[in-house]
Amino acid sequence: MQFDTTIIGAGAAGMMCAAHATGRVLVVDHAKAPGEKIRISGGGRCNFTNMHCTPDAFLGANPHFCKSALARYTQWDFIELVEAHNIPWHEKTLGQLFCDTTAKDIVAMLRALMQGAGVELHLQSTASNFAKNTDLFTFTLTTPQGTNHITTKNLVIATGGKSIPKMGATGFAYDIARQFGLRVTDTRAALVPFTFSEGRFAGISGVSVPSRVRAGAGEFEEALLFTHRGLSGPAVLQASSYWSEGENITVNLCPETDIFEALRSQRRITGRRNLTTELAAFLPARLVDHLAGDMDLSGNLADWSDARLQSLIANLQNWRLHPSGTEGYRTAEVTLGGINTDDLNARTMAAHAHDNLYFIGEAVDVTGWLGGYNFQWAWSSAMACASALSA
């Protein structure tokens, strides 16, 4: 069996690329259905892109690599595609766009595009024994119906990273890259909750609070959620991409409210009340009780001088915490790191050493923020590749 292009991986990037590539195209995936990560994303509504998608929302060893693909196929292009297929959508916070009904609408759209392009899709199938003979790749395709020897002019790897292994995620893309001489940067779980030893926050599990969380060079102002294992919520997930093992993080529990002035004014009116009672007007009471174990919050408000109140607010705005780790790939939204972009053509996503070997999507060392950015990278990198395949 011979194909012009074979794409390994029927996820967001793989399906998008297949739908727009020309010639005889084969897509291979081990799952029972295509687009499984699309289906479960965004609480089943798929946060398919972000209105504020720009290159500065992406991490990687080479921060400039993503610029070409993102500029040539933007969030507005994908929105136009969604609307052309009559998929209703809405914006949530911070430019995040979701389907009104179900993420399955995005999967159905991509499947329809693939079918219209005559793409051959093999599910519950595996590809192995890759080799390159002259200008053609060969591999063994094992399907429920049997085994075939495949020859393909172009090979596209779109199998993602290691995040959410229960859905079959592996380091397959990295293995193929190394086999053909490409480098792979260190990888780790990203957009992932932090863990703390000895159930530090188990007593306030479920408490959520507006916050500003800083880790390394990243700082994000969104919700923070305390869990039995540690810390989660959008601000924490965002910061995790900038965190390195062994480092502290800093949490600002009152990023917008001027608690000092509020408490100072209240001191003149209800000075005989406990400080914890007054503080609970600004922070959840369960959190205040927990903080009383870390910080001295004893006494009535009248007993607290301006200097002592200022010291307390400084602690609340610069609460230094030391995570023991993260929840890892099990719950990570994405994988940080991947195929070294110095070994890829930013315009075509092809390997410099093999101009008919391509890597797209999460497998590449390009990682976006939480909120639709990683899906946009999947669409953009896929279209850059598809354009090269169709040239």
Image (cartoon, helix red, strand yellow):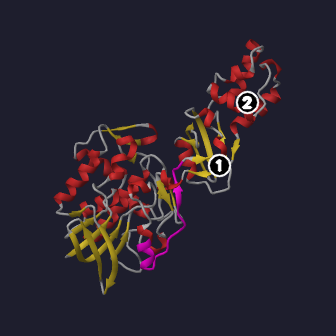
Report the disc number at residue 323.
Answer: 1
For mark 2, does the 10 Å Cα neighbourhood hold few (<14), some (14 to 19), or many (20 or more) residues?
A: few
Q: Height in image: 297 above or below 87?
A: above
Instruction: Work out how far the residue at label 2 is from the one at label 1, CA to CA, in angstroms.
Output: 20 Å
Residue 9 image-quadrant placement: bottom left
Q: Position of residue 147 (x, y in %)?
A: 23, 73
Q: Which residues are magenta?
A: 175-192
Three-letter amino acid code at the position of disc 2: Ala
- Which residue sits at x=41%, y=48%? 372
Location of the N terminus (image quadrant): bottom left
Q: Nearer the viewer, residue 203 or 130?
A: 203
Q: Is residue 243 visible?
A: yes
Residue with the mark numbered 2 = 292
Q: Is residue 197 above or below residue 278?
A: below
Tell me the quadrant of the picture where the C terminus can be found. bottom left
Q: Indicate yes or no whether the magenta region holds residue 182.
A: yes
Q: Is residue 180 left or right of residue 141?
A: right
Disc 1, SS:
loop
Find residue 338 and report its horizontal and vertical position in percent.
48, 66
Mark 1 neighbour density, 10 Å: few (under 14) some (14–19) many (20 or more):
some
Q: Residue at x 69, y 37 (%)?
A: 317
Of the numbered discs 2 and 1, the one sitting upstream in the chain is 2
